[in-house]
Image: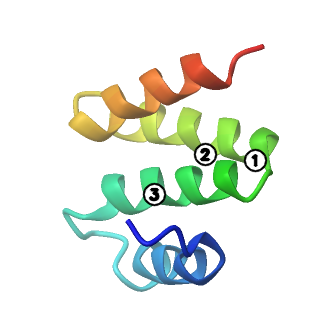
Amino acid sequence: VRRQFKDALPEFVKVTTQYPQSAKMPDAMLKIAYCQQELGDKSTARTSLQKVMQQFPDTTAARLASQRLDQLSP
């Protein structure tokens, strides 16, 4: 929300490493991809979005990842 992607990225990564069984995992992974994209790392963002879709296929996060992936496509 505040567009502080550089500061937010490690915090979302922390969620995925410290709480791998959390219900927030799909959302944290999605936010990681958003941060990567906003920081200009579109290739890594694309990979992260694909991971969300693969690991959590029937979630809102996967649907949002798919939409964002479509936006990233050339």
Q: Residue at x 24, y 70 (%)?
A: 22
**Measured from the top left, where is residue 52 in percent x and y?**
45, 41
Q: Residue at x 79, y 51 (%)?
A: 40
Q: CA distance from mark 1 to mark 3?
A: 13 Å
Residues tagged 1 and 2 counted as in contact (Cβ below 8 A)? yes
Q: Residue at x 43, y 72 (%)?
A: 2
- The kind of residue tagged 2 is Ser
Characterize the local packing of mark 1: few (<14), some (14-19) or many (20 or more) Cα atoms within 10 angstroms.
Answer: some
Q: Secondary structure at mark 3?
A: helix
Which residue is under mark 1? Answer: 44
Who comes first in sequence, dot 2 or dot 3?
Answer: 3
Who comes first in sequence, dot 1 or dot 3?
Answer: 3
**Measured from the top left, where is residue 13 in percent x and y?**
53, 75
Quadrant of the image containing the N terminus: bottom left
**Measured from the top left, where is residue 33 in percent x and y?**
57, 51
Q: Secondary structure at mark 1?
A: helix
- The kind of residue tagged 3 is Lys
Give the number of the disc on residue 48. Answer: 2
Question: Which sits in the foreground, 13 or 36?
Answer: 36
- The kind of residue tagged 1 is Thr
Which residue is under mark 3? Answer: 31
Quadrant of the image containing the C terminus: top right
